[in-house]
Amino acid sequence: MNTPQQPLLNIQGLTKFFGGLCAVKDFSMTLNAGDLAGLIGPNGAGKTTAFNLITGIYHPTQGEIDFNGESMVGLEPFEITRKGIGRTFQNIRLFPNLTVLDNVCVSYHPHAGYNLVDSILRNHRYGAREKELVERAQDFLAIFKLEGIQNEQAKNLPYGEQRRVEIARALACNPRLLLLDEPAAGMNPREIVDLMEMIHFIRDRFGLTILLIEHQMRFVMGICEKLTVMDFGEVIARGTPKEIQDDPRVVEAYLGKGAAHVS
Amino acid sequence: MDFLLLSMVKIVAVLAYIYGLMWVLGHTKRWVKFLGVALAYGIIQIALSTEILTAFDRGLLFQASAITMVSLGLNLIYGFNGQFSLGQWGFYGIGAYTSADIAWRWVNGDASGFLAVLFGVVLVGFVIIGVGAFLQKVRGVPVISAFTLYLLGTVLAGAIAVGLAHLLSPLFAGGLGVTGAPGPLAQGLPLQLLFFVSVILAGAFSAEVSFLFGLPVLTLGSDYFGIATLGFTIVVNTLMVNSDTILPFPEMKGGRGMVGVPQMNEFAWLWVFVFMLLVIIVMRNLIHSSTGRTIMAVREDEIAAKAMGIDIAQTKLLAFIFGSLFAGIGGAVYAHSTGTSFLSPGTFTFLVGFNPLIIIVFGGLGSMTGTIAASFGWIFFLEGMLRVLLGQLGTEAPTWRFVLYPITLLLLMLIRPQGLLGLVEWGFLKAKIHPLRRSAAADAAADSAKLS
Amino acid sequence: MFLEVENINVYYGAIHALQGISFHVNEGEIVTLIGANGAGKSTTLRTISGLLRSRTGSVKFKGHDITYMPAEQIVRLGISHVPEGRKIFAPLTVRENLLMGAFTRTDPAEIEASMQRVFTSFPRMRERINQLGGTLSGGEQQMLATGRGLMSRPGLILLDEPSMGLSPILVEEIFRIIQEINSQGTSILLVEQNALMALSIASRAYVIETGRIVLEGDAREVAENPQVKNAYLGV
Amino acid sequence: MQYFKKTPVTDHKPNSRLAWVGQGFLLILAIIVIIILAQNLIRSPSLFAQNVIDGLKLGFVYAMIALGYTMVYGIVKLINFAHGDVFMVGAFVSYYAVTRFSLHTWAKQIFPGMPDWLVILIGSLTVILLSMVVCVLLAVTIERVAYKPLRDAPRIAALITAIGVSFFLEFFGALGFVFSPRFIPYKQPFETMSWYINNGIYPITPGSMPPDGSITFSNIFLIIVIASIFVQLLLQFLVRRTKIGIAMRATAFDKPTARLMGINVDQVISFTFAIGAAFAGLGGVLYAIAYPSIHTQMGILPGLKAFVAAVLGGIGSLPGALVGALIMGQAEALTMGYISTPMRDAIAFTILIVVLLVKPTGIFGEPEKEKA
Amino acid sequence: MRTFKFLSLVLVVSLLLSACGGGASKEVKIAILAPLSGPVPTFGVMTRDGALLAIEEWNAKGGVNGMKIVPIVEDSQCTPDPAANAANKVIDQDKVHYIIGEVCSKASIPISDIANGKKVVQISPTSTNPSVTVGTDGKVKDYIFRACFIDPFQGQVGAKFAMEKLGAKTAFIMLDQANDYVKGLAEFFEKSFTEAGGTIVGKETYTSTDTDFSAILAKIAEAKPDVVYLPDYYNIVNLATKQAKEKGITAPFIGGDGWDSSDLDLAAAAGGYFTNHYSPEDTRAEVQNFVKAFGAKYKDDSGNPKVPDALAALAYDATNLMLQAIKDAGADDPTKVKDALTKITFNGVSGKITYDASHNPVKSATILEVTKDGIKFNSVVNP
């Protein structure tokens, strides 16, 4: 475990240019272990780009990302994941033709405990470890109330279940930091309440640090302990939900000027 | 019309045979499994020995088996891993020529082919592991540089292997005899054992070539990868045509075709059956494992796979290597089971190379059953049924064979673009359906979660 | 009625994205659909413009049933869809983009006149006329997309998230232009995440949540609705 | 404030170590190629020039076929394997137009007083036009029957269909009553003339060889170059200046949005096939004139090479198709001239692979966007 | 499992049925294996037509030994696998004892292995590869014969003609490395030419799918040989000679029997010479009757009588040889037929044919000259 004074995630001066376009500009953020933080901002503000930079899908033009005291810059996405950063995607990216169980099992691959030779020979080790792996995955699905649909193809699930599978899959990577990209998109209020409970639950149960992007203010304000607001690739405010709500810049950027008099 | 009926019955029978074989392989009782496999082998072996199955059927059966292995390999690369490859036929050819040359030299009193490939395969294997470990340590090496290092290592290893082979091959001279008068090692059971080894070596050789080729080329986008691999097939074919001028293999006789390739003869079905079964089992075991899941995950969504901690480059390479291994084994088995001791580059041109692709799309991408069934069905339809049918219709009709074939192809694609069997799997090939599991821990966890 | 959408159900594969949505737009008004990401706002627009098919119900425009009409014909009837994310033809110049907007029209002189009108609304476009669409900034792209949508001289414009990724000044600008377009007699169906801004210019509003309309009414009333406030600011 | 501030890493490239190894490897390859070429250039400049001219001829023919591939691929992402066979049909149509119907001299029959050169010019243009029209009809039919029903199916299904169509055209054409299985000596609508350059341009007369160090070329070479450049310019005009051309580019970029503009995407796609086929028809006639032995499988290899050229140049890009084709032509001609003829396909593909490794989407290709 | 049992039953029953269906003894079946698809369907069609003509003529005369001759045509694609399948099919399924074919050596070799193993007589009309009739062990395959020259003879004749009649001192050879017919001729031409004191000033290879020979021709223009030896089929000859004319190359081209075709481009190849089995101008009755009968049976695109080429002539001869041997043997018995073939003396279109120990025909060669107006007889060279 990292010492309290050392943040789990420390991002400094992160900048990303696409061609001439600056998608993320001098983005900084620190997360301590156990934080439940939110990243908000209008569409196109650069939030997802920031996620992609943290997870290595894009390589930053400038800046540093330290996770657990180690630099993540230049690492391949799969290496970053193996170091302990899991994520979900804005527009659900499950493996549509695989079953729910297999979707989760894929994440266990680095910890499968048996290698290629074992699987080809189907030896004892394969049998034992594969069984263990599947059982672990099944336990996991049970936590998310997905055990009944474990043999369904992911593409045949309704939206809400797909979201849950995606979160389960990300958690199966055994991350310390979980990045959730719009987990509540397309959910109805009831599902959102469930989701909020679930996020609290997984954070406590797995000892996670969570960073999420979300548009549903109800959700964000209700769940996050600290917030960072982005607009045009830049951080314009940070603080607790209460502070953010009262920040005029945020109100202006997020709701537009017309809203100023409403709230 | 009894010919038509008969050939249709043959198609159905061969599919039933495969179904039975897969069913029996998937049986939970071990003795049923072994007995069933032995029976499946035995039925055909007896039918072949007693000539109930004629040489015509035998030819179709063996060709279908060879193409099954190639197509399975391609399905692993394309159907399961999503890499559109047209290079499979090249690896098939490499396998065929490698094994043919090993065996040809062997029966002609020269062990150097065998030794060179053996040492080559082993040494290159070391090179791959060694350079791989080095690159792992250095990290962040561009693909072309990595390729260059592997290439240098391979060339070095190849040179050492050839040197060693020339040094050691006289040791075998006594046992091998000379051309026309083969010694004890070059005939009978030892020769059959050599076939076994050389088929595996040829497969391994194909796999190593595919590693070297795939390493840089797999970084290309889908269609570009397809064209690059098509280029590979064409380059391999060109080298075959010029094997006696550009390459130093006079016994391959270049474009005129290699004659005198040793044949498995009475053991042919044994080896064909064993290797086909081996390929099916290895591939099935591979797919239904953790690695297999990653292979499919890469097909489904590369970015999501990356985010789940999967090394995309390694996974693609792995599927490509295994696919090529199967192609190489298929080619090697083919070379020794044609029954005509003749191998010609004409078999390995790129146009014929579309066949495995057509087969796997027919059978259904990502379906092993589909591939196996389509391989047999396709050969028995095109080379069996259509040939027999049109042969009956007069002297002009055979010209129509390749007019009817593409029409069938078009209709099938229009009716079932997702392939005949889609994702259906038979018996043994089915993925395990895991029963619901409710452990105490899970219950407790679920309770504590209090999720509605 | 000008545009009437009745009980449409749209599926993405197994996902039931729109669950029986009905609403209408009268001639000359601005109607806004608001709701969270993924609620089905864009899906509704895509269904109206013919890119998606509803399994049930009907979409009627000026008396024509356009439920099963291909998108390219719906444009000819006078519905112009300015899609989410602008969807500028990046390899085409500004001028070519605008010409594509007028694809359904044949008279070059009139097309030229429309283009001049667009340039009056968006003077920036005139400066960039030979620049490639892909090289424009976000705000310019939105202007181009809106201008392109106007080029077919539509009776109804479907605007999907015109403020996305734009700076507040630009958002103001865009909304000013939207009002201007509307004042010239074009009806507007506006989908907007910047809810309160949208409500400030709309006459009527519908709130969509997970594929259903949960609230509808006069824009001012909707804006005052506590639920809406809660949803958009979490207060 | 510390003085030695840790400067942020600029432009993180994940792959940067040991890059010199790969660069060195490519450099050595390039140096070998340059040395071989330079040596031969010095040894016999006229032979080198001759090879370059022959390569140009080949390259411009490829360019014409490559256009069809690149346009179709650009718009529907389909490798249209049947394109080479459409090209073959073009050659056959012109052959029958000339031999059966003497279409190349129709003007003579109607206006007997017309000068010969005009008759031949009009006749040849008629023949070419007829081939183009037939090819267009054929291609549009193929598109409607075989590809359109599969537009929403997996891409591979359309590819397999394309292979099927290709087989069908080859072997249906080979039936006795359709075209013929034979290698038919092509009857040109006009006479071949050739010249040599050796301190001036002189015609080659039969029975005497041009002096040493001459560079020869023929009217066919000129026609191919002119036609190919003309087609390029025409197509550039079409896609840059005309409404349908702009619509093609819009459709290629984004089909749903194109539909929102009122563009009938199906029609645009058919139109693209038609244009590609028209140029394939023209290419077929010119190819047959240049290489006058036609048979039903004549389209396979030129088609494949043209496609490779299109990929080399960056598929979807029109200038790319031209540049790629010219590179292919030079690569083949120089390989034939200085390495070994049988290796020319192998060398051409090796060049392709090397180029793709350095620039994964071809010379003029747009880089593929990564989406997350 | 029930369906499985049912299917096996059906299989067994149908196998039994098929085994019972024997042919009537009043006919003799001859299989014609030709590449009707694959890379060279034209050769296959010509071969098939020549062979069918011969069979038709024999049937018109009452068959062989009173038995009607039934032709069975199969597509062997000029590719080993389909050729083997075709051979197996006609032998196993149709119970054929006599095979005419294939054109390409790479198809004839697998067929010959199968046919020889099954004691089926095969005459390949045009495959020149020695491996067709001689096994890998160096022993002659008893049942396999061919109707064409083997390479050395044509190569020698070509070289002799070039030196003696054309007075050539230098020659340039163009060859297709992958085609053993071409390669064989080229090899023996080179050998004879250099042995007789000539010089080979250049040797360039191409492949059968090539259409552009300019690089090779540029080298020829530079080397300035007295003759160019191009022993390939007419399709290559058409292309190469046409391009040579464009480059102003005046050296005459010399080739082999592959040139013989009604599709030879006379304008391009004019001034060339080739060795052949016969000349359609030959006044021998065999030749004239054949040309006439062929033209009467087969029409070209414009409805004119088709002129047979070397492939048709050789297939015709091969079929006649086979039938003559069956007649000589007096029975439908492959063993006797192959013995009869070794002893045969037959006056065919391509001359008087006898077989040597390696089952290669011994016959004379004709030299033909190509002119703008047609192919003219030049001289006859005897072995």
Image: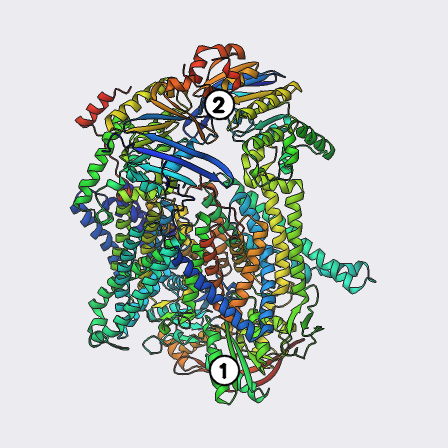
Q: CA distance from mark 1 to mark 2?
A: 89 Å
* Image quadrant where residue B208 sits: bottom left
Q: Above or below — where is D260 with respect to C56? A: below
**Residue A253 image label:** 2
* Residue B218 seen in this snapshot: yes
Near-viewer residue (C190 or C4): C190
| Residue at (62% x, 31% y) in the render | C148
Q: Horizontal and vertical percent for residue E290?
A: 57, 74
Q: Horizontal and vertical percent for residue B319?
A: 33, 49
Furthest-right residue in this view: D113
> Does B22 sit left or right of B397 as displayed?
left
* Image quadrant where residue B171 sits: bottom left
- Disc 2 marks a residue whose amino acid type is Ala
Q: Above or below — where is D31 with respect to C199? A: below
How many numbered marks have been drawn onto this rendered protein structure? 2
Q: Above or below — where is E362 with respect to E237? A: below
| Residue at (42% x, 58% y) in the render | D23
> Do marks 1 and 2 share a chain?
no
- Disc 1 marks a residue whose amino acid type is Phe
- Chain name for mark 2: A
* Residue E352 seen in this snapshot: no
Tell me if mark 2 has few (under 14), some (14-19) or many (20+) residues whose alpha carbon lies within 10 angstroms of its own: many
Near-viewer residue (C164 or A172): C164
Q: Above or below — where is B100 with respect to C37? A: below
> Does D316 sit left or right of A69 as displayed?
right
Q: Which residue is mark 1?
A: E189
Q: Horizontal and vertical percent for residue E94?
A: 39, 62
* Image quadrant where residue D108 sits: bottom right
Near-viewer residue (D298 or B81): B81
Task: Tell me the quadrant of the picture where the N terminus of chain D can be found.
Answer: top left
For discs 1 and 2, the disc positioned in front in the rendered view: 2
